[in-house]
Image (cartoon, helix red, strand yellow):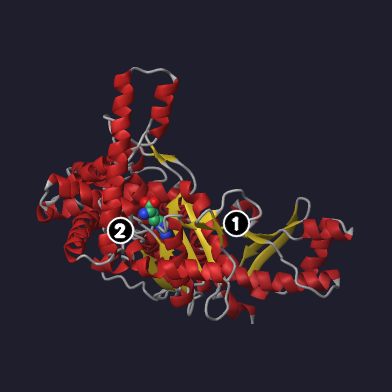
Amino acid sequence: MPTKQIKQDPLSVLDHAFRAAIARALDEEGDFDPVIRAAQNPKFGDYQCNAAMALGKSRGIKPRELAERILAQVELGEVVEAMEIAGPGFINITLGRRVLGEAVAEMDDDRLGIPRQGNGHVITVDLCGVNVAKQMHVGHLRATIIGDSIANLHERLGWTVHRENHLGDWGLPIAMTMTALENSGADLEQLTLDALNVAYRDAQLSGRSDVKGLAGAIAHGCGPHRIAELETQNEGAIENISRAKETLIALQSGDSALVANWNALIDCTMREVFDTLGLLNVGIGPEHNRGESFYKDKLAGVVEQFIESGTAVEDNGAIVVRFEDRERPLLIRKSDGGFLYATTDLAAIRHRVHDLKSERVVYVVDARQKDHFKDVFDGSRRIGWDRTPDGIESDLHHLPFGSVLGRDKKPLKTRSGENFTLRALLEEAIERGTREVVARAEDPNAPTHGIPPEELESIGRAVGISAVKYADLSSGVTRDYIFDLDRMIAFEGNTGPYIQYAHARISSILMKAEKQEIQWQDARILLDTSEEKQLGLAIMRYPQVVQETADQLEPHRLCTYLYDLANTYSTFYQGCPVLKNDDEGVRASRLRICSMTRRILADGLALLGIESPSRM
Ligand code: ARG
């Protein structure tokens, strides 16, 4: 019975009915996508079936005529109020209000209608990706919050989710930093991440030889001083690197003093990282650390298996995988026997797909690593490591994100040209958010007027962080965007605070209703005015939006939806008095759709990792 089904989802009911109608109208066996879409304008009804154009053309039938035949076949009973043909052959569908109201009520459960589509499925999300001895900067903002929201979305759909923070905690750069720290006699117990960051940079500089510079200087007949200077620099660099290599070998063989120092370095870094992640309010903790060092004992085996299976070959002492469609080979062991970033990532894929059984592995990593992942994924496919033990082909997916730019459209830098630390950026946002919230609370009519300062501060923090996160997530993963706090923190427009504010306003109406002891929880939902109906339709779209956002790995879809919902609500609220309504049934129905809107806003924001204070 269609009426029963629509309670689940009007779209699938329409889809079903039109699919069958098209087959009958064409008198063909087959499965035809009815192309049902939400109407862009309520003038054209609630949904449209757009299948007649393409199908008509391919079969030499006038699309309008085919649309008429489809209409004659479709069986929807009370589910629809009206259907009509428009333009070249669109079918405009207006849903029945009673049935729609019942469908909305049916969604009012603890899952807000979201299906457990992912039950039994496993995904790994590679996120955050900080490096030991380095401060988090704006790039890590994106790797962290995009990854966190993708993890949240899949969790909500019932997937088993592994968040993996692939820390850069192994290899030559760390050994160089350790050597530099040893030389400086620094006390590792007292170390700050800032000091560590400086040591890291110095170590990198001391290891950078300038062989080209030297050749150039000689060719250009530079003075003997310059040449001598470059010669010493090169010697120094080579010496530093060879000392660091010794350190690394000793560390690899488990030298206990070095291992203790190495752990101190990690502790120092992670203390600061978790502090910053705490400001960001994300679900990433120490339990999600699985750094490069986790794979260190597996690397020799990886290379062996690549050689044995014939996937990799020797080339001048190095081991490489070659691809027909690109010149660069994938290097998995250097001629000096050292392993690479790519070797570790191959081991990680094996772990994620084979051991964790992930059907999806999403890497939220900077767009500059595009080639790296292409090669590593293709290498894994070549050897068959993209198959789970059950033989399912895992979807290995690099989600490359764009850069965060300053107002000058260049990568965001401080005035002195340094990278912003993520912490500094977040602290500024929190300060701005707090200022905004405190200023608003001065208005005697504000719901926040007179509340304790700690509470104001916690609201301010939520607003500042939501501004940053929402601006990032809503601009689309792959695009660059301009970091402009003024725009991001505004209470008007497509911003995090705007959506939080809509949520807070509904919360205050519901609190009033509760005080007046109005019962609305089980009210019949009436969608008689066009504003009510639009809000009902917007509510109905939520489960599908969550699913599409997760499938497509596009958090901005959810942002756009929440912004639309907040706007649709605002139109509803202007046109439809809620508490002031004398008709008890209408009042209760409106309170119930207010409450569902509020819950969806809070739920959607939570999926984006954003808090929703109940007053602002
Ligand atoms: N630490 C790496 C970097 O800073 C990012 C790690 C990304 N994840 C991975 N599996 N490679 O570039």
Q: Is residue 417 above or below residue 583?
A: above
Apparent side of residue 296 relative to residue 3 in the rendered image (left or right): left
Q: Earlier in the sequence, mark 1 or mark 2?
A: 2
Q: Is there any visible trace of residue 204 in the rendered image?
A: no
At 34% across and 17% down in the image, what residue appears? Answer: 223
Residue 99: where, in percent of width, then height? 57, 72
Q: Residue at x 87, y 61 (%)?
A: 59
Residue labelled with disc 1: 322
Tell me where residue 406 sits by quadrant: top left
Local packing at callout 2 (Cα closer than 10 Å; few below 14, some 14-19, many 20+) is many
Residue 244 to residue 518: above or below: above
Q: Indicate the position of residue 91 as horizontal and vertical percent values.
A: 72, 59
Query: For the point 31% across and 22% down, which residue is it?
Result: 226
> Where residue 483 appears, x then y in whole percent?
36, 39
Quadrant of the picture in which ligand 1 is shown: bottom left
Where on the picture, by quarter, is residue 321?
bottom right
Is residue 278 visible from the viewing direction of this image?
yes
Tag count? 2
Drawn side of residue 66 relative to residue 297, left or right: right
Q: Disc 1 beta carbon < 8 A from ligand 1?
A: no
Residues tagged 1 and 2 counted as in contact (Cβ below 8 A): no
Q: Give the labeled residue for mark 2.
A: 169
Q: What element carries label 2?
A: loop
Residue type, label 1: Arg
Name the kind of residue labelled 2 in the image.
Answer: Asp
Q: Position of residue 213 (x, y in %)?
A: 39, 28
Q: Which residue is the extreme one toward the right?
A: 60
| In the foreground, 346 or 411 | 346
Q: Decide which of 550, 515 is in the foreground and name it.
A: 550
